[in-house]
Amino acid sequence: MRVLAVTGSSGGHIFPAVSFLDAFKQKKSGAETLLVMPHSSTSNQIGVIGHRIRYIPLVRFSPRISLNNLIALLKYVKGSLDSLWILIRFHPEIVVGFGTIYSLPTVLFAWLLRIKTMIHEQNVVPGRANSFLARFVDKIAISFHNSSSFFKLSKNKFVFTGNPLRQNLKAVERCRALDFFDFDADKFTVLVIGGSQGSRIINRVFLEALALLTDKYSLQIIHITGNKDYDLITGEYKNLEIKFKSIVFLKEIEYAYSISDLVVSRAGASTITELVKFSIPALIIPYPFAYSHQLKNAQILQDLGAAVVIDENKLNPQMFRELLEGLISNPQRCDSMRSAYRKIKMFDAGNLLVDQALSLLKA
């Protein structure tokens, strides 16, 4: 049995694809798996064990006519032909797409070759690639029940699976996690995540807000900076003279979640699912250029009372400081936000997605 997963370049797309393939190999030990994705800094950082990988070109388009866009288009055409060749060589029995423009050629060619196809949508609001592919594929797996209403297709095509998380993403004993970061047990721990690529505005405004806090020395910070801001952020923390750990990219994020009292983050689908799994109060700043995908994701937690959603256009250090102080000084509110997560039931999304893939193969 051969199964191919194709995904985009960010952790929010790669992690669910890897989780699906891991679960597939666990259920079908003799299965051959192949992961197809663009070569990017994130894909280099994410360890993929036990699966073959084929890379396609990473291209960046901008909404204007230019030589760079023409070159990007030619690279994309080459990547599309590479995708066809990968399908012919590997000859999968099913292809599962995890969104973004990079999955389009592989899933479409699989459909033309009469290979079974499925797409998985991580966000509440589907991306443009999955919205286009939905009419061709055999099945559409969704992470949120209300996502099906955005597709305008027959309900029979949809299955709810949730969003697969990495199998190693499990709670770590508190003392082990504290030792991992060399942190203190009695300090309020804040985890700052700007997504797998990092977020310059979150990095900057959080640090400026931190400098305004009157009791900053009672805090300890885990800050996932991304590549571009690491040196700058690390230098700023040293000037503040508080306990911190700055990291470009953290594979062992379960250690950070296991000791965090508050998370400051974007609202990627994987981050939202991880917050639910670990039940952590959050200040969420949705990425404003993601076609409202992140806002809809964040509102799931805000409606529960588990998170506060902040409009990036209104974000400033003074307002951020007030929000931080309001949570740090009010443990009852943090406890209430943690308790709100009990209203959400977690599913074994990886295995549910595998079951759906296998049902297609038996059909």
Image (tube, rainbow, N blue to C red):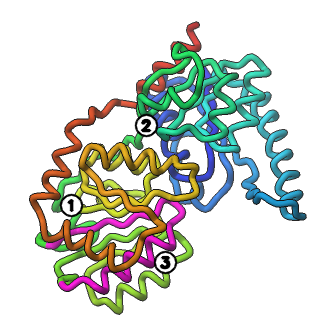
Q: Is residue 191 magenta?
A: yes
Picture coordinates of residue 128 (x, y %)? Answer: 65, 40
Q: Residue at x 36, y 85 (%)?
A: 237
How many residues crowd mark 3 within 10 Å: few (<14), some (14–19), many (20+)?
A: some
Give SS at disc 2.
loop
Q: Residue at x 74, y 58 (%)?
A: 60
Give SS at disc 3.
helix
Picture coordinates of residue 343 (x, y %)? Answer: 22, 36
Picture quarter with the C terminus: top right
Of the residues under marks 2 and 1, which one precedes in the sequence?
Answer: 2
Q: Which residue position is annotated with label 2? A: 164
Left or right of 256: which side holds 363?
right
Q: Which residue position is annotated with label 1? A: 176
- The kind of residue tagged 2 is Pro
Q: Which residue position is annotated with label 3? A: 230
In magenta, the rendered stretch is 187-214
- The kind of residue tagged 1 is Arg
